[in-house]
């Protein structure tokens, strides 16, 4: 593919949904585009704001937090796997309201507590902690929300 054909095809890809630079580079690689052409096209995409890491991070964080119920740690890890600098996504993660965040964790733990089985309270509590850790919440946040959960039972 020529540079102009590649540019037209990848702008259509970028217009369909938010994508980060690593996803665009991976797509160009799968298409077999020459590395020099891929670099030139990526530079154009960034300059014309088809690809914007901050905008991508904001959308990714919103979707994973609201719809997938992920914690800050898991979201940050996923973004680092997409080769996005922590200086881009860390301030955006800190914008999440702490009270709302802990409220969402409490709600998540309450829903999970209804279906968790265990012989002892200790076993049920450890299963809830493992569940929340897997969702990307930190231990201190989980321990902060567990007493609220025990009061409601």
Image (spheres, grey):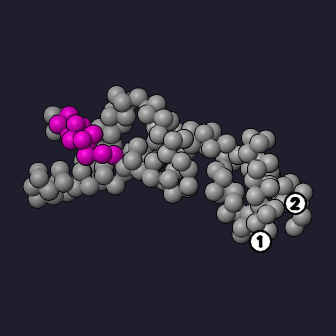
Mark 1 residue element: loop
Q: Which residues are magenta?
A: 137-149
Q: Position of residue 23 (x, y in %)?
A: 65, 57
In the image, which disc is placed on residue 46? none
The crowding category of the residue bearing disc 2, from other C-alpha atoms within 10 Å (few below 14, some 14 to 19, many at least 20), is: some
- The N terminus - image quarter: bottom right
The crowding category of the residue bearing disc 1, from other C-alpha atoms within 10 Å (few below 14, some 14 to 19, many at least 20), is: few
In the rendered structure, are the residues bearing label 1 and label 2 in contact, judged by CB atoms less than 8 Å apart? no
Instruction: Tell me, yes or no, whether the highlighted magenta stretch contains residue 23.
Output: no
In the image: residue 65, left or right of residue 17: left
Q: State the predominant SS element of the stretch in magenta.
A: helix
Residue labelled with disc 1: 32
- The C terminus - image quarter: top left
Q: Position of residue 124 (x, y in %)?
A: 17, 53
In the image, which disc is placed on residue 3? 2
Residue 111 picture quarter: top left
Residue at figure coordinates x 24%, y 51% from the top left: 129
Q: Position of residue 34 (x, y in %)?
A: 79, 68
Q: Position of residue 102 (x, y in %)?
A: 32, 34
In the rendered image, the vertical position of residue 105 relative to residue 116, given as above or below: above
Mark 2 residue element: helix
Along the polypeptide, which appears first: circle 1 or circle 2? 2
In the image: residue 87, left or right of residue 145: right
Single out the residue that lies furthest toward the front: 36
Residue at figure coordinates x 48%, y 35% from the top left: 91
Residue at figure coordinates x 56%, y 38% from the top left: 58
Instruction: Tell me, yes or no, whether the highlighted magenta stretch contains residue 144.
Output: yes
């Amino acid at each position: 593919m020529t540079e102009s054909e590649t540019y037209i095809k990848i702008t259509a890809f970028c217009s369909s949904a938010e994508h980060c630079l690593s996803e665009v580079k991976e797509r160009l690689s799968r298409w077999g585009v020459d590395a020099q052409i891929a670099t030139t096209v990526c530079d154009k995409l960034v300059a014309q704001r088809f690809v914007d890491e901050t905008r991508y991070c904001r959308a990714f964080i919103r979707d994973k937090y609201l719809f997938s119920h992920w914690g800050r740690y898991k979201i940050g890890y996923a973004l680092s796997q997409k080769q996005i600098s922590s200086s881009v996504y860390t301030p955006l993660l800190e914008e999440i309201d702490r009270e709302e965040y802990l409220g969402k964790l409490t709600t998540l733990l309450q829903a999970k507590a209804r279906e968790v089985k265990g012989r002892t309270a200790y076993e049920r509590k450890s299963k809830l902690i493992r569940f929340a850790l897997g969702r990307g919440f930190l231990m201190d946040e989980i321990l902060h929300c567990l007493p609220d959960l025990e009061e409601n039972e």
